[in-house]
Image (cartoon, helix red, strand yellow):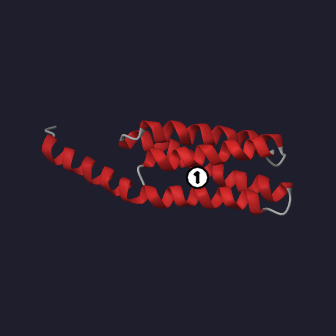
Amino acid sequence: MVVDKEAFAKKLQALKDDYDAQIGGRIDALESALCDIAAAADSAGQIAAAGELLELAYKIAGSAGTFGHQKLSAAASDLEGRCEDIVKDGQGPSAEINKELMELVAACRTYSGV
């Protein structure tokens, strides 16, 4: 099988460009889910919002490194782990954990370049 390296490189670049164009919306979604944690009326609502944040962070952590954003991938992975702890513990996040979540989401924004 003969691989046209130039065509392959162009396809990869197009995928990366598409990803880069969408990353701002993904970071916006992280920020929105973080706000949902703060706005939740009770612990159950906070846990549900943390589950949403976990899912979003998981997707970014898995895809960002593939497209050359290793720092974003690492920050999203840390965010994912923190959210996983909240969901697993079954308790809404403390003020300290909320601060950590905010810092991790801010890091994702910084490392995304948007």
Residue 7: percent from left, percent from top: 16, 48
In which quadrant of the rendered view does residue 18 lie? bottom left
**Residue where numbered disc 1 is placed:** 56
The residue at the point 47 percent across, 47 percent down is 110
Q: Going by the image, does 101 lie left or right of 18?
A: right
Residue 4 seen in render: no
| Other-residue count near label 1 (Cα within 10 Å), few / some / many at <14 / 14–19 / ≥20 | some
The residue at the point 15 percent across, 40 percent down is 5
Check the picture and name the quadrant holding the C terminus: bottom left
Tag count? 1
Check the picture and name the quadrant holding the N terminus: top left
- Vertical position of residue 110 compared to residue 85: above or below: below
- Comparing 112 with 45, the one in front is 112
Residue 52 seen in render: yes
In which quadrant of the rendered view does residue 101 lie? top right
The residue at the point 52 percent across, 46 percent down is 108
Q: Going by the image, does 70 lie left or right of 80?
A: left
Residue 94: percent from left, percent from top: 81, 44
Name the amino acid type tagged 1.
Leu
Residue 9: percent from left, percent from top: 20, 44
For label 1, the SS is helix
